[in-house]
């Protein structure tokens, strides 16, 4: 085992304490724990040409002078960004944060964090995600930049805080956990080089100002929706009735939906039976996702609960029939990585099953089924502390309203983009307000579901607790029917940013009203839900 820990070989390192955790748990992670970076072979081959370029430009002195001027201009303009209430919109770290003039201590890199007008920090992941949606896209380096000591010092974090961020919240080097207990875990960095120009820094400043600076005097917290227009939005009535217009389950994660007219809701897990019970995993044990493998959306699984079989179809392929009987799985327990979280899984089916999926997708993969026994060893709960019941990211039930989709389509049409349907958001339940045939009960900044706290199916002795909004990623950009990429997330970012995420839809946790009632509960299209604030 190497004594030197670096080069991506560790999950966490605390410089002022003897605390280092190497990567591990999976075969890929165990290999990374033994790798302390690799030599830049291609760079060595280009050294002679690189020196020729430096000489042609006048040497390092002129390049340094050029990049320092750009860094000074950037920091000067970032300091001038102020919210309407007078508070600074950016906090700059390092030498540039301590001095407003160019000195020998300044370099061509600028590290900073964006600050909301209530003083809370905008996480670096949110900044990076929104920058990628900018036109043209801006690519920031974020996190601690492989320098945990300087990062910890700049952010004012103690060694114990860094350790607790890892042990309690799972924060490791290179992940997307950017704010813990209101404190940043990293920063955003801009680096200038010989090819950088003034237009580059101007694009950064313009992006930060347009996206994060609130020019209104009213203070908005991170729990509010985008504060570009803080006009008071009318709230929903205290009680709203909606009916379920569509029911979906997703037997295989990231693959096409199955739409039944009614389906069994399992308790106490609170999920639709077989929903996200399977996933396709690659050689590293990571679940394949639609944004990295768009052909997943063309795979259509259909579960027949009576025959205990799942029929899987795809264009140009003979249907695959997978037996769901628990006694027929192949292989032992494994750890499956889903969006960075560890889940338990068992390889399911024989070599024919693996060959069918691998052949269609062009990626070596295996079908895995969720296993609760495996997660007892690893993490039985998701990032929210909720007991897992499948390969879902957050909660077992995701609800989207038709009026929210209608509001989004208004924005998409204004941006000359194609409208989308509810399936783009992979919901389990789609609802429509009773008596709102034209989906008019929405506002650009608030959907009818934003204020709900509980929902109930009184005639079925069932209630749902709203567990929060669903944070969205680039998966919503992909049409599940064609795999083509659109700009849905970019449209949502204009008006649905909340708590550092782009939110659309709500998560539900099912609760049975009478614990002595052991009857199965079926969710049907047409069911009426009473929604309460």
Image: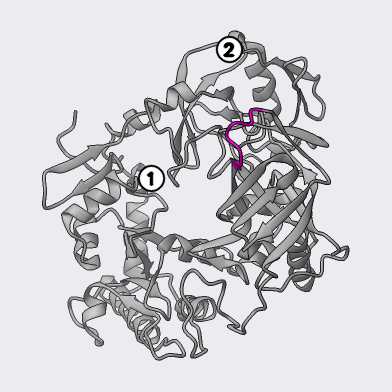
Q: Is residue 249 left or right of residue 172?
A: right
Q: Which residue is mark 2?
A: 329
Q: Secondary structure at mark 2?
A: loop
The residue sitting at the top extreme is 327
Q: Which residue is mark 1?
A: 42
Q: Quadrant of residue 434?
A: bottom right
The answer to whether one can see residue 26 in this image is yes
The magenta segment is 511-518
Q: Would you say the magenta stretch is mainly helix, strand or loop? A: loop
Q: Residue at x 56, y 67 (%)?
A: 497
**Residue 489 image offset from top left, x and y in percent:** 64, 60
Q: Residue at x 70, y 54 (%)?
A: 400
**Residue 143 image offset from top left, x and y in percent:** 35, 58
**Quadrant showing the C terminus:** bottom right
Q: Residue at x 61, y 38 (%)?
A: 514
The answer to whether one can see residue 420 in this image is no
Q: Is residue 497 left or right of residue 402?
A: left
């Amino acid at each position: 085992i190497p004594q030197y820990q670096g080069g991506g070989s560790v999950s966490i390192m605390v410089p002022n304490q003897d605390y280092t955790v190497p990567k591990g748990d999976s075969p890929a992670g165990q290999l990374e724990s033994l790798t302390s970076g690799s030599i830049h072979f291609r760079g060595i081959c280009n050294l002679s040409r690189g020196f020729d370029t430096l000489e042609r430009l006048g040497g390092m002195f002129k390049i340094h002078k050029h990049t320092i001027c750009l860094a000074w201009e950037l920091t000067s303009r970032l300091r001038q960004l102020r919210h309407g209430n007078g508070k600074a919109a950016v906090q700059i770290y390092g030498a540039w944060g301590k001095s407003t003039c160019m000195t020998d201590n300044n370099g061509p890199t600028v590290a900073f964090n964006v600050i909301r007008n209530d003083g809370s920090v905008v996480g670096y992941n949110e900044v990076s995600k929104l920058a990628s949606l900018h036109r043209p896209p801006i690519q920031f380096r974020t996190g601690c930049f492989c320098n945990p000591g300087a990062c910890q010092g700049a952010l004012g974090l103690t060694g114990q805080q860094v350790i607790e961020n890892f042990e309690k919240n799972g924060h490791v080097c290179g992940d997307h956990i950017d704010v813990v207990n209101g404190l940043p875990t990293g920063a955003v960095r801009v680096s200038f080089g010989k090819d950088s120009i003034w237009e580059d820094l101007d694009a950064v400043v313009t992006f930060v100002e347009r996206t994060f600076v609130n020019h209104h005097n009213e203070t908005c917290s991170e729990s509010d929706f985008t504060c570009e227009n803080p006009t008071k939005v009318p709230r929903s009535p205290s009680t709203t009735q909606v009916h379920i217009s569509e029911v979906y389950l997703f037997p295989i994660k990231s693959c096409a939906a199955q739409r039944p007219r009614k389906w069994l809701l399992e308790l106490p897990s609170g999920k639709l039976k077989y929903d996200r019970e399977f996933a396709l995993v690659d050689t590293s044990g990571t679940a394949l996702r639609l944004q990295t493998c768009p052909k997943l959306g063309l795979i259509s699984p259909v579960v027949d609960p009576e025959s205990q079989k799942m029929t899987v179809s795809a264009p140009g392929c003979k249907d695959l029939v997978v037996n769901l009987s628990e006694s027929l799985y192949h292989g032992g327990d494994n750890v499956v990585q889903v969006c960075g979280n560890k889940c338990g899984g068992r390889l399911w089916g024989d070599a024919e099953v693996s060959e069918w999926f691998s052949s269609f997708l062009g990626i070596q993969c295996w079908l895995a089924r969720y296993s609760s026994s495996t997660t007892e060893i690893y993490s039985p709960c998701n990032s929210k502390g909720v007991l897992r019941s499948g390969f879902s990211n957050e909660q077992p039930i995701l609800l989207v309203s038709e009026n929210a989709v209608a509001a989004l389509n208004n924005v998409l049409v204004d941006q000359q983009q194609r409208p989308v349907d509810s399936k783009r958001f992979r919901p389990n339940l789609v609802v429509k307000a009773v008596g709102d045939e034209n989906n008019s009960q929405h506002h650009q900044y608030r959907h009818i579901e934003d204020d709900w706290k509980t929902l109930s199916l009184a005639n079925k002795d069932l209630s749902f607790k709203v567990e929060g909004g669903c944070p969205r990623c680039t998966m919503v950009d992909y049409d599940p029917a064609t795999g083509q990429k659109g700009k849905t997330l970019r449209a949502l970012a204009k008006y649905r940013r909340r708590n550092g995420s782009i939110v659309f839809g709500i998560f539900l946790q099912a609760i049975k009203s009478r614990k002595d009632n052991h009857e199965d509960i079926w969710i049907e299209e047409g069911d009426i839900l009473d929604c309460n604030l």
